[in-house]
Amino acid sequence: MVVVIRHFGGILLGSGGLVRAYGRTAAECLKNAPTRFVKSKVPMGVEVPFELLGLVYHQLQSLKVQDINQDYETGTEGTTMVTFKVDFDQAESLKDALKNHCSRELEFY
């Protein structure tokens, strides 16, 4: 995002001149600015039986998910809710990996 602030209140440039001046300033800023690639993160949750927690955590860590949290009060008896954020482009492969490595059907949210 580029914000151009006008310090002079006059009309000497006219509307076309202002657009060109602002556009040139914005282009110069973007040309000299450092770039950074940002991936979208998707919040997900999965209800996990206690005996599968180790396996699920191993899979989550191998795909470098972020913000892993565990809630023992949410979920049915004998399960816990694990929430996390995963890269948007890895969400489906994470679901598939967990389903393939677990002996039970997992409920994703």
Image (tube, rainbow, N blue to C red):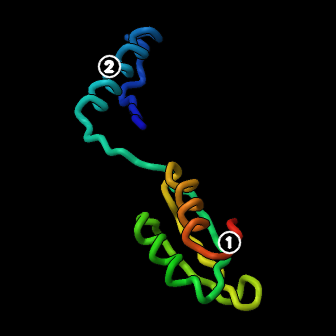
Q: Quadrant of residue 103?
A: bottom right
Q: Position of residue 70 (x, y in %)?
A: 58, 82
The front one of 53 and 17 is: 53
Q: Quadrant of the N terminus?
A: top left
* Element type where label 1 sits in the image: loop
Q: Quadrant of the C terminus?
A: bottom right
Q: Which mark is residue 24?
A: 2
The residue under label 1 is: 106
Measured along the vertical axis of the image, is residue 3 above or below residue 91? above
40 relative to 33 in the view: left or right:
right
Mark 2, residues whose alpha carbon is within 10 Å: few (<14), some, or many (≥20)?
A: few
Q: Position of residue 40 (x, y in %)?
A: 50, 50
Q: Position of residue 44 (x, y in %)?
A: 61, 64
28 relative to 87 in the view: left or right:
left
Q: What's the residue type where badge 2 is placed? A: Arg
* Element type where label 2 sits in the image: helix
